[in-house]
Image: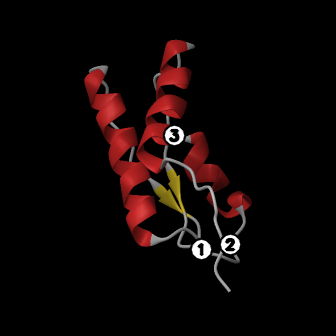
Amino acid sequence: MWGDSVGPQDPEGARLATGHLLGRGHQRIACVRTPLVERSRDQARSSAYRDAMRRRGLQPIAYFRLEPRQRVGAHQQSLRSV
């Protein structure tokens, strides 16, 4: 059964989130990706994040990819280095 739904505007949401953090003075912002999101939406978010960072003259950080059963703690050491 199909019905109406409202979905996020992935690229715009990523731009807004990254812009908000940059506006608050953050410069080291990582993008965490997951296969739980449709590939096209994941790529759109990641691309918008990279664009927002580059527009501010900052190098995007290599992203972290969390697998469905993986916990954030598994990447804790890597995230600390960001």
Residue 52 in percent (x, y) is at 35, 31
Of 50 and 41, nearer the camera is 41
Residue 49 in percent (x, y) is at 40, 40
Q: Is residue 75 above or below residue 35?
A: above
Residue 33 in percent (x, y) is at 51, 59
Residue at x 62% of width, y 51% of height? 77
In the rendered structure, the answer to whether residue 53 lies left or right of residue 42 reads: left
Q: Quadrant of residue 61?
A: top left
Tell me the kind of residue under disc 1: Glu
Tag count in the figure?
A: 3
Q: Which residue is mark 1?
A: 67
Where is the N terminus found, in terms of image quarters?
bottom right
Q: Nearer the viewer, mark 1 or mark 3?
A: 3
Distance (Cα) linking label 1 and label 3: 22 Å
Q: Which residue is mark 3?
A: 13
Q: Which residue is mark 2?
A: 70
Q: Residues within 10 Å of mark 1 (few under 14, many from 20)?
A: few
